[in-house]
Image: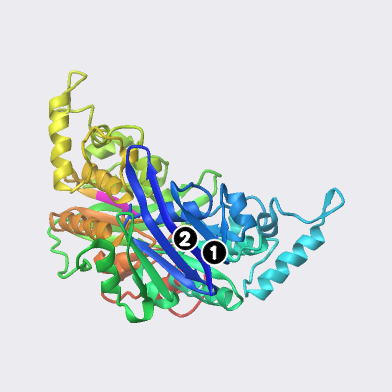
């Protein structure tokens, strides 16, 4: 039985961008349905329309055969539609039960009925096999458990249709397997799910059918069981896509360009978050850092670039740089692809040209005697747009007008322009489609071949396994173990990421 129908959905944004072009979608009740496409293909816009965050120019939505209007998320929730966002919508200082029932608490007169709240949440958790400590604070939970809380929050609000946006992006392999079990349990109990992901192997694991969007249009609706991952990739990008992998060992001819010795640092609360970190990266080598988010990766990046003080030694090209400013560290050859391009890597309200020159506007040849050399800046930006295949009409366009993949290319073009000695690449392909991710990997491997020491921090184990020479696992602020990528597996890394050493001991 068809549960959701979206018919002829069309959405154009100011400036003429056609995000959805006569898109139709049919989702059966009790189905896990994949929605696939490149960045900018229209997936997010379509789901925002379904969840009431955007309004279509044309088209209609039907639930259980009845046409519905969804002016806002509250209306979506009343209709039984819920969305698990990639970045969780939870309050860290509140407990699990408080987050789940927030705004929907049962009352006894004018007072919250805490017993009824707890009983209802506990009953839902038990029904769907979501084993969670209801009294635990969100801040104390792993990312995987937080995701369970998000799902339980939607079930508490009686959601029948769940939209999951990149649900595995920050999970360990074991947590991903747990998520798949939960999803299968949900549909067995009568729920329906729309699954958005760039990881095609996940589609084959849990989805029954898939709609593929390209440039705002539906290019195909296929049964997953009889469609291969390469075929799905070809539908998404319009041509054959091959993965990028290391094929040769590192031709390391330079000494270690980045060295950390007994590095320790505190978080914003004054708690120790990096504990005696030791690592080294030679020129021409990619060292991957694996770990569940929240185990010190963010603070490690800040320590390296000079945003957070640290004890111990940070050595770049043989020189201790602890006391150097962010700008001076850049002059020593450090470049960084930040983990959040929108918050830390780009200014959406500035032009592409301004973003490209943001880290070097103060130095020749981009400026002289305090005056910008606009001709040189313009020439540089146009060359970079061509070299990195940034698809835009002009370098004077606002960065906010670019797709996620093109925006990430701007960051990479800027950071690789000076051919850095040390590159810190943090989540460089997060949220990117397979075509854009392949381009990023090619750029990293090109810098590896040129002798750059690359520290690759990623939550994507496939990424780490495909282009890293070695992989170090960061757990609770410590390097738990470092493995050659030739012997590392998703299972080994997943266990280490959860704090289990090879003998099975839980740290």
Crowdedness near tag 2: few (<14), some (14–19) or many (≥20) residues, C-alpha within 10 Å: many
Residue 28 is situated, as x and y percent measured from the top left of the image, at 50, 72
Crowdedness near tag 1: few (<14), some (14–19) or many (≥20) residues, C-alpha within 10 Å: many
Q: Position of 131 compared to 24: left or right?
A: right
Q: Residue at the location (37% across, 38% down)?
A: 14
Q: How many marks?
A: 2
Q: Which residue is mark 1?
A: 162
Report helix, strand or loop for mark 1: strand
Q: Position of 362 compared to 8: left or right?
A: left
Q: Is residue 297 visible?
A: no
Q: CA distance from mark 1 to mark 2?
A: 15 Å
Q: Position of 104 compared to 234: left or right?
A: right
Q: Which residues are magenta?
A: 423-428
Camera-nearest residue between 12 and 108: 12
User: Which of label 1 and label 2 is nearer to you?
Assistant: 2
Residue 167 is situated, as x and y percent measured from the top left of the image, at 47, 63
Q: Which residue is mark 2?
A: 6
């Amino acid at each position: 039985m068809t549960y959701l129908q979206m018919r002829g959905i069309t959405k154009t944004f100011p400036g003429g961008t056609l995000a959805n072009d006569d898109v139709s979608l049919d989702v059966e009740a009790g189905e896990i349905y994949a929605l696939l496409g490149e960045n900018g293909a229209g997936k997010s816009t379509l789901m925002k329309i379904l969840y009431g965050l955007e309004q279509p120019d044309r088209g209609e939505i039907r639930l259980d055969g009845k046409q519905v209007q969804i002016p806002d998320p509250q209306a979506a929730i009343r209709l039984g539609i819920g969305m698990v966002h990639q970045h969780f919508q939870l309050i860290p200082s509140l407990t699990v039960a408080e987050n789940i029932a927030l705004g929907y608490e049962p009352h006894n007169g004018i007072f919250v009925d805490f017993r009824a709240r707890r009983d209802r949440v506990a009953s839902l958790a038990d029904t769907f096999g979501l084993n969670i400590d209801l009294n635990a604070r969100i801040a104390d939970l792993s990312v995987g458990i937080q995701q369970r809380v998000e799902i339980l929050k939607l079930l508490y609000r009686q959601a029948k249709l769940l939209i999951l946006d990149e649900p595995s992006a920050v999970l360990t392999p074991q947590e991903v397997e747990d998520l798949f079990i939960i999803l299968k349990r949900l549909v067995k109990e009568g729920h329906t799910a729309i699954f958005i992901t760039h990881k095609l192997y996940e589609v084959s694991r849990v989805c029954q059918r898939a709609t593929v969007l390209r440039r705002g249009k539906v290019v195909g609706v296929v049964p997953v069981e009889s469609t291969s991952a390469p075929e799905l990739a070809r539908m998404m990008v319009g041509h054959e896509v091959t993965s990028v992998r290391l094929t040769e060992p590192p031709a390391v001819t330079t000494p270690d360009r980045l060295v950390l010795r007994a590095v320790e640092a505190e978080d914003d609360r004054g708690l120790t978050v990096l504990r005696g970190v030791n690592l080294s990266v030679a020129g021409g080598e990619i060292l991957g850092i694996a770990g569940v988010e929240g185990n010190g990766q963010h603070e490690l990046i800040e320590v390296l670039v000079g945003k957070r003080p640290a004890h111990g030694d940070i050595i770049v090209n043989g020189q201790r740089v602890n006391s150097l400013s962010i700008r001076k560290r850049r002059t020593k050859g450090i470049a960084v692809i930040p983990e959040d391009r929108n918050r830390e890597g780009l200014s959406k309200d500035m032009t592409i040209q301004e973003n490209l020159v943001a880290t070097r506007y103060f130095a020749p040849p981009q400026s002289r005697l305090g005056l910008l050399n606009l001709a040189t800046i313009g020439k540089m930006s146009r060359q970079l747009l061509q070299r990195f295949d940034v698809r835009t009409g002009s370098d004077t366009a606002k960065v906010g007008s670019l797709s996620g993949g093109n925006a990430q290319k701007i960051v990479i073009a800027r950071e690789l322009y000076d051919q850095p000695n040390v590159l810190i690449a943090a989540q460089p392909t997060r949220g990117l489609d397979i075509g854009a991710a392949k381009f990023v990997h090619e750029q990293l491997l090109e810098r590896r071949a040129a002798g750059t020491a690359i520290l690759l921090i990623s939550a994507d184990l496939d990424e780490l396994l495909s282009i890293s020479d070695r992989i170090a696992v960061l757990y609770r602020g410590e390097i738990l173990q470092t493995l050659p990528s030739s012997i590392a597996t998703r299972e080994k890394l997943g266990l280490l990421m959860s704090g289990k050493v090879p003998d099975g001991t839980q740290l």
